[in-house]
Image (cartoon, grey):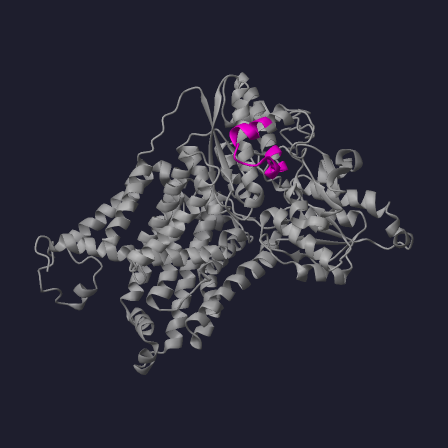
């Protein structure tokens, strides 16, 4: 394996073509990224850990949305509902009378995490069923219905009343155990989220470079052409809904575990829009874009808060914060419609081709 | 070119933020403030935030905490729970605060486990009874009667003073009919839903019939469906669990549709803005008030008005609300706790709770608030609740309920923690 790809000749085998890390240079970058995210952030940027946890959460949530919107072309405005289903499912399942030895061994939580993801996936498929017949704006409406039926009706009125705890469900952090490892401190939560993100990202990448991924992209680009080529579009659409819902479900479960308490307020319609906003800013149809978009959102809030904090924290400045946020999104749509991922690709190309760009 | 300007603007704002390093003096006490000035509860949150700012200035001008000044790090979180949690971590790790003045039930309950772990006193504007059991939430504190007690008191006051006394109900009373009770609140909202279980329990205790709950959004602009449901049920008393804006909408619709029921309103729905927004529909509104209204002639009000004029001169005086006074209550409670803790020589979260606030017994905060007491077993500040009624363009006292006196057994043993 060479360090750089020779100009012109790219790959000789399919395995090479499909490899995640195609050159030693990329491998080096990935090792650096791993060092930063596994060592530098949790040990040297401890004051900012909760921002990074938020970044992980937004990235994971947006990953599912990216899969649906960016790769399968199915517009969704109700993804927070599937996060909610995952979160509530995990909390309620953890409240079941599990045998003590299973809790002590730490096998319950991983199992619950998996089941919550599957429940959310199935829930997502139910609301994805109309995609067999409708698309575009009409599909947006059915996914919005998912939001309101799931969160504002089903969860707010019935599920959150379970156990007589009113709106909030709680989960003690000593129950969140993976084998001997108890997820307790901020750093543990960070690692839990990080590992989950890596797993989910690889899952999505693997889907994308195999048969379902190619089918999704074909459906996104032109569903009639895809069908005429023999792709069972209903099946693949529902598969995309399932995978996306699964990611949403584990994201919700992760969120619940990181907070130890969940409420319907955590999964509002605004959050669904926010997730779509992340992929718009990051770049539709790009896995990088999910992370850049999430980072931008977290950084933006943080920066605006610091600015507002400097001038006192009350008065009209609050509205400038809201306005600035709206402006940033407008700015992206006007000047960078392909998102931050495209900007990243451009800057990368600039350096790759320097000094003889053509 | 346009693109370049955009990126330049982004880069400049980044530098601006990163350059804002802060240097602190040693004799300062850092306190965090988490407020909602742009979100769902901003109708009452803006005034509260102003009140916090003014009350802290007043404490600093009057000796501070045994000579040390309070530095308030106040931020708006727009009633988004995620943001509140991140903000709290920022306040704790980067601003080194030793106590937080928080806001709503959502963020307070979301943070309650974290603040217990961190031993960080969290004085909230949420008076949810779920925060009063020190076994579960030792570091959550507030100065006012909790929502559940308030709701119980409002229903009891209506039963005592109106159902039992009003000649209008005489024939029905004589027939042995039960009064009909119904709740209007935003189901998916922890503040609105916090006292619902307690208020229904109380209605049942008083022998009322309870109708189907009506879901009314905090941002509702129309409540006709809910009012019509109440009319079909022939409700006599409606409990409003929302904030002023949607409560006024429901009351206006109730007047238009001639519902003819009384309205009992929770703390954050009952203020000077209610008659402004609801107009004549606000007549006979019954509500809970933990303290005096803005500008009322009570002990300590001069300072409130003086500092409101001094610190925020561009906010008109007739726009100020009871929320300012509530903010003062929170600050005064925390300041006294810190003063007592500081005298022991060590000022941190644990001493503020153990040596400060939990040593208060019948401590008078002024401003028309009931004296507060805290013990390591019970964080309900007071068992006395004052109920007001809006009649003839002014808020008049209707009744004062003391639960410890009336239901001592239930108060001591049954009602703690929800």
**Relative image position of residue B25 (x, y in whole percent):** 40, 21
Q: Height in image: A172 above or below A313?
A: below
A35 falls in the magenta region: no
The quadrant in which the C terminus of chain A is found is: bottom left
Observer able to see residue B364: yes
Q: Could you tell me if residue A107 is visible in this image?
A: no
Residue displayed at 33% across by 54% down: A331
Q: Reply yes or no: does residue B310 show up in magenta.
A: yes
Compared with residue B132, is residue B65 higher up or lower down, i.e. above or below? above
The residue drawn where x is 57% and y is 36% is B316
On screen, residue A324 above or below A135: above
Specify whether A350 is left or right of B239: left
Residue sitting at x 60%, y 29%: B305
Range of magenta residues: B306-325
Residue A105 placement (x, y as % from top left): 44, 48
Q: Between A269 and A197, which is closer to the camera in this rendering?
A: A269
């Amino acid at each position: 394996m060479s360090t750089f790809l020779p100009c012109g000749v790219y790959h000789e085998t399919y395995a090479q073509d499909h490899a995640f890390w195609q050159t030693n240079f990329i491998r080096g970058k990935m090792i650096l990224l791993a060092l930063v995210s596994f060592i530098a952030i949790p040990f040297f940027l401890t004051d900012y850990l909760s921002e990074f946890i938020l970044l992980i959460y937004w990235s994971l949530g947006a990953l599912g949305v990216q899969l649906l919107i960016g790769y399968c072309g199915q517009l969704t405005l109700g993804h927070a509902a599937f996060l909610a289903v995952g979160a509530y499912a995990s909390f309620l399942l953890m409240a079941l009378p599990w045998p003590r030895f299973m809790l002590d061994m730490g096998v319950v939580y991983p199992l619950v995490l998996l089941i919550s993801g599957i429940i959310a996936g199935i829930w997502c498929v139910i609301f994805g069923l109309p995609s067999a017949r409708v698309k575009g704006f009409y599909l947006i409406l059915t996914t919005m219905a998912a939001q309101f039926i799931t969160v504002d009706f089903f969860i707010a009125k019935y599920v959150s009343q379970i156990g007589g705890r009113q709106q909030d469900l709680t989960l003690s952090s000593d129950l969140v155990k993976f084998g001997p490892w108890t997820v307790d401190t901020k750093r543990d939560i960070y690692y839990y989220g990080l590992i989950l993100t890596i797993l989910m990202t690889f899952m999505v990448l693997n889907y994308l470079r195999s048969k379902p991924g190619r089918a999704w992209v074909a459906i996104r680009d032109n569903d009639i052409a895809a069908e005429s080529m023999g792709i069972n579009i209903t099946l693949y659409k529902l598969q995309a809904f399932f995978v996306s819902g699964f990611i949403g479900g584990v994201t919700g479960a992760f969120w619940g575990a990181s907070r130890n308490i969940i409420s319907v307020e955590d999964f509002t319609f605004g959050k669904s829009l926010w997730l779509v906003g992340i992929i718009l800013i990051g770049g539709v149809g790009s896995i990088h874009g999910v992370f850049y978009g999430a980072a931008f959102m977290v950084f933006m809030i943080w920066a605006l808060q610091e600015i507002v904090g400097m001038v006192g924290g009350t008065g009209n400045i609050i509205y400038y914060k809201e306005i600035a946020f709206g402006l940033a999104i407008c700015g992206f749509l006007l000047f960078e419609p392909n998102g931050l991922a495209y900007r990243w690709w451009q800057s990368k190309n600039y350096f790759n081709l320097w000094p003889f760009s053509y | 070119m346009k693109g370049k300007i955009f990126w330049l603007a982004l880069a400049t704002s980044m530098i601006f933020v990163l350059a804002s390093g802060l240097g602190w003096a040693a004799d300062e006490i850092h306190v965090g403030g988490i407020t909602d000035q742009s979100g769902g509860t901003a109708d009452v949150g803006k005034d509260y935030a102003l009140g916090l700012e003014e009350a802290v200035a007043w404490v600093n001008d009057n000796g501070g905490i045994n000579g040390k000044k309070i530095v308030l790090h106040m931020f708006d979180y727009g009633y988004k729970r995620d943001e509140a949690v991140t903000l709290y971590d920022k306040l704790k790790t980067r601003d080194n605060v030793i106590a937080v003045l928080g806001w709503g039930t959502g963020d307070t309950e979301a943070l309650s486990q974290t603040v217990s772990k961190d031993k960080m006193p969290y004085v909230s504007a949420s008076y949810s009874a779920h925060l009063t059991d020190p076994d579960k939430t030792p570091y959550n504190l507030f100065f006012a009667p909790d929502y559940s007690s308030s709701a119980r008191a409002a229903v009891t006051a209506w039963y005592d003073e109106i159902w039992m006394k009003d000649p209008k109900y005489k024939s029905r009373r004589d027939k042995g009919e039960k009064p009909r009770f119904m709740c209007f609140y935003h189901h998916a909202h922890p503040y609105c839903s916090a006292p619902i279980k307690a208020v229904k329990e109380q209605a049942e205790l008083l022998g009322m019939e309870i109708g189907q709950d009506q879901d009314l959004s905090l941002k509702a602009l129309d409540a006709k469906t809910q009012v019509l449901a109440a009319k079909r049920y022939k409700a006599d008393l409606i409990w409003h669990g929302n904030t002023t804006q949607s409560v006024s909408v429901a009351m206006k619709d109730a007047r238009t549709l001639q519902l003819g029921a009384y309205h009992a309103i929770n703390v954050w729905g009952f203020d000077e803005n209610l008659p402004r927004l609801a107009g004549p529909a606000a007549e006979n509104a019954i509500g809970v008030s933990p303290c005096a209204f803005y500008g009322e002639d009570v002990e300590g009000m001069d300072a409130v008005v003086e500092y409101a004029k001094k610190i925020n001169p561009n906010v008109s005086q007739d726009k100020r609300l009871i929320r300012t006074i509530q903010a003062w209550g929170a600050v005064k409670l925390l300041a006294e706790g810190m003063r007592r803790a500081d005298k022991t020589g060590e000022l941190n979260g644990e001493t503020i709770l153990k040596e400060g606030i939990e040593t208060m017994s019948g401590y008078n905060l002024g401003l028309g608030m009931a004296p507060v007491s805290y013990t390591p077993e019970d964080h309900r500040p007071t068992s006395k609740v004052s109920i007001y009624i809006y009649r003839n363009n002014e808020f008049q006292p209707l009744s004062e309920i003391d639960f410890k006196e009336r239901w001592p057994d239930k108060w001591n043993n049954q009602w703690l923690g929800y």
